[in-house]
Image (cartoon, coloured by chain):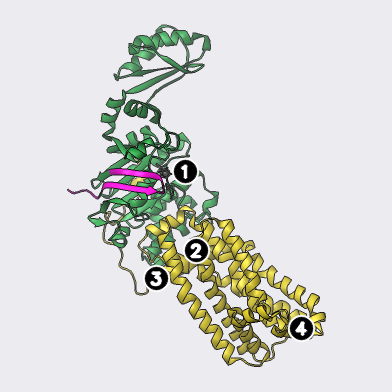
Amino acid sequence: MSDTVTTTTTAPVRAGAPPIPARRGALLWHSLALARRNLAKIRRNPVSIGDAVLAPVLFLVVFVYMFGGAVGGSTHAYLQRTLPAILVLSAIMAGMIATGVNLSIDIKKGIFDRFRSLPIGRSAPLIGSVLADVVRYLVAVATVFVVGFLMGFRVQTSPLAALAAAGVTIAFGMALSWVWVLLAMVIRETTLVQTIVSLSIFPLAFGTDMVAPVDTLPGWLQAWARVNPIEHTMAASRGLLVGGDTAVPVVESLLWSIGLVAVFAPAAVVAYRRRT
Amino acid sequence: MGNVFEAEGLVKRFGRTTALAGIDLAAAPGSVLGVLGPNGAGKTTAVRILATLLAPDEGRATVAGHDVVRDAPRVRELIGLTGQYASVDEDLTALENLVLIGQLLNLRRREARPRARQLLARFGLGEVAGRKVATFSGGMRRRLDLAASMIGNPAVVYLDEPTTGLDPGKRGDVWRMIRAMTRDGGAVLLTTQYLEEADALADDIVVIDQGRVIAHGTAAQLKALVGGHTIEVRPADPTRLADVITVLGTVAGHRAETPRRDVATVQVDGDGALDETVRRLRAAGIGVAELALRLPSLDEVFFALTGHGAQRPDESGTSKEDAA
Ligand SMILES: Nc1ncnc2c1ncn2[C@@H]1O[C@H](COP(=O)(O)OP(=O)(O)O)[C@@H](O)[C@H]1O
Ligand SMILES: [Mg+2]
């Protein structure tokens, strides 16, 4: 009577009652619940994905109008050639900027301590974060297609192939983002994570034939471009969007995606588990 | 009945810092254990070990008989944690925060929502369930944090400095809710820097300093060790301070002190001291602006127990740690 707030509702269960048994696929459910948390954050603060729109626009405009005439002969021909690569670059950047840095900030907050005190898989918060960033990839990819279309780009293959290009690209972007997740787990300083991630964009993105054909690059850069996994994904994207060799680069890109996840995801989870 | 959790000889070092130098803790079902200590004493480290976030270098800890290192997944099913720094998400609403945790505890969405609403009502947040936590006051956030740790009906709840940073006026609310947290039979481990808080909530108090237990007992036992209450008087007319000092000296039988320009304080033992003070002040015709009976501060507790004030380890040098 004296304490109305606390006597209105009595919890039906005694303290320490057996927990609710986990459903099948608990890790997936937990990861999805945590991904929904990140999505709610994006919905409340849409400006936080502004870079996923702005970066692709800048790439298209700068590359096509600045280099198009010089490298590609005409801006139209250059757009056809370079948009598939910009698609990949944009998707990678969309994950790069967010995944590692956001996790690095998040993990220092108390809420990650609570997650770690819950009976959920250690990997769930990391998987949730990577999954939620799919929204960023989708926004970046859509922006490239819309702005590219307005600038005169036309898919030469089929709508289905264009969807496949988006799929291969997003799969690769997500796979690569485990590298940034690992960095965020190993390095405590958020600014250092940010610096390393931003600098990695240069060898990754420009050691490719995105801007100019590989034969025109210096020898050492050619060697790197031939092993650079991003180059395979860009080739796959080009094949799927404008035609040409498709099957081999698509398979190579998917294999790289699987390989990156297989190596970096477990490494990131181990690093997260070790972190105090 | 056995203890809900037990820690024996916990040692934890961070590089050259010894955060815990061998401490024992235990609590029975339905009881509150207060861990009292200054900043840097090792409170958070102890909580993190008991919450499976950190492995001890030496010693062991169990929750309901399960080892916090070897059986960590089982222990996580039995505990609730409210960390020192807000462990709720500012960008989500209060309801979304609790539903998320419910889902992580394997409740389905339609089960998690009523459970969340029930807890929000219980912690006085029913009206603001749909508001973003970023708009909450410190007290509301703390209460949400408490509710969040209760979702899984834990056998033990760890509350790391639940009222630090709150207005003294808001502490009462949080205290009332913490008291209610044990009524389903769960135990609470509460860390604090305020003797008052430990006194108000804890059945059993462990005082720690530099990773070591320096006293252990009920609030009454500790108060007896430390020397009762302090009476504090601020006269309405500052020029009557000397008269106040005389009155307090007579009541206590020893000299009163003046910690601030316009305030006199004195330590008293008996319960009648406050009444007598009021009577004598009135008889002397001294108007009072402020009159308080308070428990010793943490500094005074430490002075009584250790002969020095509550120091941070980095101020006291490393000699103590080297001796360990
Ligand atoms: N992760 C850490 N790395 C290094 N030192 C730490 C870490 N956590 C705590 N410490 C040190 O251990 C001691 C105890 O800290 P803590 O348990 O946070 O104390 P309290 O919670 O009582 O303020 C302090 O000297 C603190 O600086
Ligand atoms: Mg602390």
- Asked whether residue B92 is in view, the answer is no
Residue A232, position as x, y percentages in the image: 60, 83
Q: Quadrant of residue B117?
A: bottom left
Q: Amino acid at mark 1?
A: Gly
What's the residue type where badge 3 is placed? Leu
Front in this rendered view, residue A197 or B138? A197
Q: CA distance from mark 4 to mark 2?
A: 41 Å
Vertically, is B155 above or below A220? above
Is residue B118 depicted above or below B24 in this figure?
below
Chain in green in the render: B
**SS at circle 4:** helix
Label 3: few (<14), some (14–19) or many (≥20) C-alpha neighbours in 10 Å: many
Q: Secondary structure at mark 1?
A: helix
Magenta region, main secondary structure? strand
Numbered disc 2: what chain?
A: A
Q: Amino acid at mark 2?
A: Arg
Do badges 2 and 1 share one subunit? no
Q: CA distance from mark 2 to mark 3?
A: 15 Å
> Which amino acid, mark 4?
Tyr
Mark 3 beta carbon near ligand 1 (under 8 Å): no
Tell me the magenta residue range. Answer: B1-23
Check mark 1 vs ligand 2: CB closer than 8 Å? yes or no.
no
Taking the image in four quarters, ligand 2 sits in the one at top left
Residue at mark 1: B139
Residue at 34% from the left image edge and 13% from the top image edge: B252
Residue A125 coordinates in the image, percent (x, y): 45, 64
